[in-house]
Image (cartoon, rainbow, N blue to C red):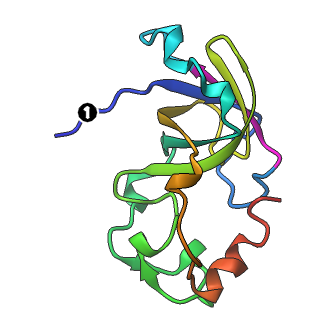
Amino acid sequence: MIILNPIAIAYNERLEIEDDNWGDVISKIILDQSLPDEALYGINSFSHLEIVYYFHKVDKEKIVIGARHPRNDQTLPQVGIFSQRGKNRPNQLGLTTVRLVKTAGRELVVQGLDCINETSILDIKPVMKEFLPKGPIKQPDWTSEIMRNYWG
């Protein structure tokens, strides 16, 4: 058994689960009181962060462990849950790279976090170019189609 405790909570204006228009969303991430202020020391020297979070509003009965059409769009190919980034995943984990807008004590203000208000944050990692993919990135055409409006 794995037990994870949230390290922060994200607050923003998005109250409903939606598939598109996340690029301009500004979120405030507030560090949990169980962690010291120094956990964020130096984070403002990075432009981007990777945020791992928990899809807390996913209906457990809608979790997919096999294959499905992304966004339940029958015109798209049926692919395994691990070949897409849908929220109805077995462990309900989300991962997004965000722009760090500013820091204020125990708070981070970020842009482009695709989670709804009061989402539990499980981890925060700085983006370092050495961890980015080397060489070209390959992906099927359907991914560009569904992501066309995702960031706005």
Kindly identify the residue that appears in the image at 48 percent across and 41 percent down: 56
| Residue 25 picture quarter | top right
Please provide percent x and percent y for residue 35.
44, 13
Image quadrant where one finds the C terminus: bottom right
Image quadrant where one finds the N terminus: top left
| Residue 45 picture quarter | top right
Q: What amino acid type should be assigned to the residue bearing mark 1?
A: Ile
Q: Residue furthest left?
A: 1
19 inside magenta stretch: no
Relative to 143, residue 150 above or below: above
Kindly identify the residue that appears in the image at 38 percent across and 52 percent down: 60
Q: Secondary structure at mark 1?
A: loop
Q: Which residue is mark 1?
A: 3
Per the rendered image, the range of residues in magenta is 24-30
Please provide percent x and percent y for residue 74.
58, 87
Label 1 crowding class (10 Å Cα cut-off): few <14, some 14-19, many 20+?
few
Please provide percent x and percent y for residue 105.
66, 10
